[in-house]
Image (tube, rainbow, N blue to C red):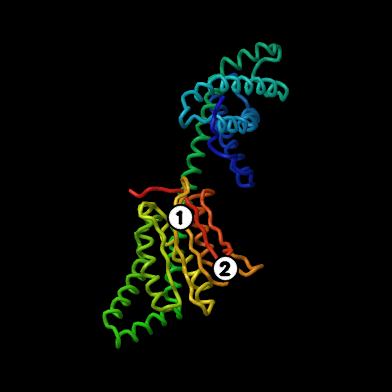
Amino acid sequence: MNTTPISDSPPITPRRIAIWFVSLLCPTLLFATQNYVTLLGTEREMSWWFWFWRESLVWAIWGIVSPLVFAFTRRVPVSGEHWLRNLLFHLPIGALVAAATLLLFVLASHAAGLSLAPATMTLRERLQIGFTRSFAIAISIYGVSVTAYHALWHYRQARQREIREWQLERNLVAARLEALRNQLHPHFLFNTLHMISALMSQDVAAARRMIARLSDLLRRTLDSSGTQETSLADEIEFLEGYLEIQRARFHDRLTIELRIPSQLHDVLVPRLILQPIVENAIRHGTAAQATPGVITIAAEQRGPMLILTVCDNGPGITAGKDPQEGIGLANTRERLQQLYGQQSILTLTNRPEGGACATIAIPIVAGR
């Protein structure tokens, strides 16, 4: 039968074992006390301890059987596309499980001296009485077990979604702070302010434009919209403000080449995904060499994937040095993992002609 599991089996921990023990002890105490109080003063009156050990036997059997029920439910969930077919399949299985638990209980209670039947009654008669009185209850316990498993699974899924959303928000905030830290780095900020000061005596319009670029860059970095993704066009527009300041800083020593096809402008990308990578390329490429630097930012579609590349003509990655180090790149990699899972790729490699190249591959999602 073609079924789809709804979850992997959760790990067994001391905390889970304790919860499982308490979940079996509670109905044991409840039903033992109920039977004791109900039968007080009747011919079937027994001590509370008799009922406790009898109910302990019942729920110990269900404690052994329930993990098997959970495992079967995990393979044949009463949810999703085939929920009705799976529900119908649970009915005969539930009947078999109920019959098996009743058989075990009758045999075990007789052996332990906890049976309510007269000693002269045959095993067949004991089974008939047990099935007549308790088969419907056993079926109900099976149904409650299946329902409890689904409830716990949905709770776990909701918690995982909350944690994932929290991690994504945390990583977005970290990306903003990292971008802001780079932009407020003493060298970057002081050089920018120095350029503005020099331009004030030469080209007031250019100085004002630089001030506007710097303020816009800081404002957009701290934008609190909270959205994880933006269009590639918006991401490039934000990046242009940063690049204009860097061009003014390095003058003729920095050339930026943008190769972004217009048909990819509406594709969604993670917000602030390119800035830390470009910053890394400028810091370890252009700033690390005396010759003019060239940064190439490109995007292309390969099947269902968007490929973003940031390449420089700097000294490249030093042999033996971890190319994945750095807070900005580490946070970028974690954000990609949270957003796209195994579908995303971030690699840093040396170029054959010299320099390094960072490549990001993510699934294409058209903007709305």
74 vs 223, nearest the viewer: 223
In the rendered structure, the answer to whether residue 234 lies left or right of residue 165 reads: left
Q: Is residue 212 left or right of residue 146?
A: left
Which of the 4 quarters of the picture holds residue 65?
top right
Q: Residue furthest bottom?
A: 201
Q: Residue at x 62, y 28 (%)?
A: 58
Which residue in the structure is indicated by mark 2? 354
Judging depth in this view, the residue of 276 and 37 nearest the camera is: 276
Q: Quadrant of the N terminus?
A: top right
Q: Residue drawn 46% across and 24% down?
A: 84
Mark in the foreground, 1 or 2: 2
Label 1 to label 2: alpha-carbon separation = 40 Å
Amino acid type, callout 1: Trp
Residue denoted by label 1: 166
Residue 52 visible within the image: no
Which residue is painted at 30% across and 80% down in the image?
Answer: 207
